[in-house]
Image: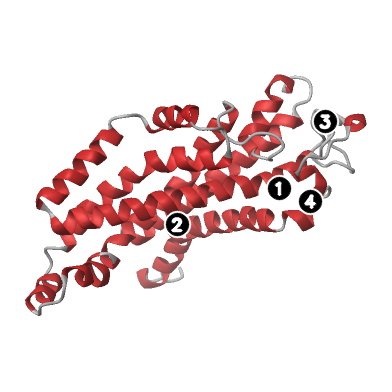
């Protein structure tokens, strides 16, 4: 006698947990580990002074061991400590870029989508000008003009990132502006700024939040690329892209100098992408 099949109602939560939800949770947990490592770097780094300008010439290029889990670099600094402090720099850049570009893009997009007419035409044409250039090339051009620093990286990436959020928000806001509850608010004499803040903006944020989570990995990679090319962070600031650039010539002999910063970039970008994909599947279904 065969056991009766489980009803579909019982299988659905399990299928959901094994699919979309688990994907988002995995990305969130992995990203939380990176964030905690960055926040606790001064306390969990084995050699906190190596996150700054300290050097130990007699301990240069030591392979991974019990004393230095990730080995040491060319001037004897502990690579694990540098990677942990580098997480602070990379996450700071990502948060700052997403905050600046997200706020600017969302505000312009909401105005364009709700107002329509000449306001939408002007904002969208300016947006098209920025989108006509590849984002990485435009960031490179801006970084070359400015003095290399972490601030330069933030500005260079944010200037090229906001048009994506402006266009996305404008399209969603234009759809929200035609809905019945917005028309009812207009008929009741609610001022336009209040309608935008209370009705249009909150109902336009879901796709933007998903896009922000997806773009976190892209910002990390772009910032690392700029620092790798010498246009971002510079010594003694610990930054993953800069660490990769400094260790690239040693890959065949002292592989640990470049491998661990590169893995940190890979893991963090992967965490952002997995979290973003999970949120997109969860919030758009």
> Badge 2 is on which residue?
19
Q: Residues within 10 Å of mark 4 (few under 14, many from 20)?
A: many
Specify the farthest residue to the left. Answer: 187
- Provide the secondary structure element on which disc 2 rests: helix
- Provide the secondary structure element on which disc 1 rests: helix
Q: Residue at x 59, y 29 (%)?
A: 228
Q: Residue at x 42, y 51 (%)?
A: 100
Q: Quadrant of the C terminus?
A: bottom left
Instruction: Tell me the tag on residue 75.
Output: 3
Contact between marks 3 and 1 (CB within 8 A): the answer is: no
Contact between marks 1 and 4 (CB within 8 A): the answer is: yes
Residue 208 position within the rendered picture, expressed as x and y whole percent measured from the top left: 34, 55
Instruction: Tell me the tag on residue 180.
Output: none
> How far is the residue under mark 3 from the one under mark 1?
18 Å
Instruction: Tell me the tag on residue 45.
Output: 4
Residue 120 in the image: above or below residue 115? above
Residue 10 position within the rendered picture, expressed as x and y whole percent measured from the top left: 41, 72
Q: Residue at x 23, y 39 (%)?
A: 126
Q: To which quarter of the image does residue 193 belong? A: bottom left
């Amino acid at each position: 006698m065969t056991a009766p099949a489980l009803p579909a109602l019982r299988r659905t939560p399990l299928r959901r947990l094994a699919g979309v939800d688990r994907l988002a949770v995995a990305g969130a947990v992995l990203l939380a580990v990176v964030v905690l490592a960055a926040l606790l770097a001064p306390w969990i780094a084995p050699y906190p002074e190596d996150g700054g300008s300290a050097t130990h010439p007699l301990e240069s290029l030591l392979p991974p061991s019990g004393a230095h889990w990730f080995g040491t670099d060319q001037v004897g600094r502990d690579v694990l400590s540098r990677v942990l402090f580098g997480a602070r720099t990379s996450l700071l850049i990502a948060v700052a870029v997403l905050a600046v570009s997200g706020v600017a893009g969302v505000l312009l997009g909401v105005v364009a989508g709700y107002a329509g007419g000449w306001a939408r035409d002007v904002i969208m044409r300016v947006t098209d000008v920025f989108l006509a250039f590849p984002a990485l090339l435009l960031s490179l051009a801006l970084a070359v003009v400015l003095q290399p620093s972490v601030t330069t990286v933030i500005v260079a990436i944010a200037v090229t990132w906001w048009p994506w959020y402006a266009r996305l928000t404008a399209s969603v806001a234009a759809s929200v502006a035609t809905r019945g509850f917005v028309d009812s608010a207009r008929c009741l004499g609610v001022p336009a700024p209040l309608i935008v803040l209370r009705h249009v903006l909150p109902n336009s944020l879901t796709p933007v939040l998903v896009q922000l989570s997806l773009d976190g990995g892209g910002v990390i990679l772009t910032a690392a690329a700029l620092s790798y090319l010498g246009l971002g962070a510079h010594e003694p600031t610990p930054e993953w892209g800069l660490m990769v650039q400094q260790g690239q010539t040693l890959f065949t002999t002292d592989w640990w100098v470049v491998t661990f910063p590169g893995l940190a970039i890979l893991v963090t970008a992967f965490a952002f992408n997995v979290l973003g994909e999970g949120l997109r599947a969860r919030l758009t279904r």
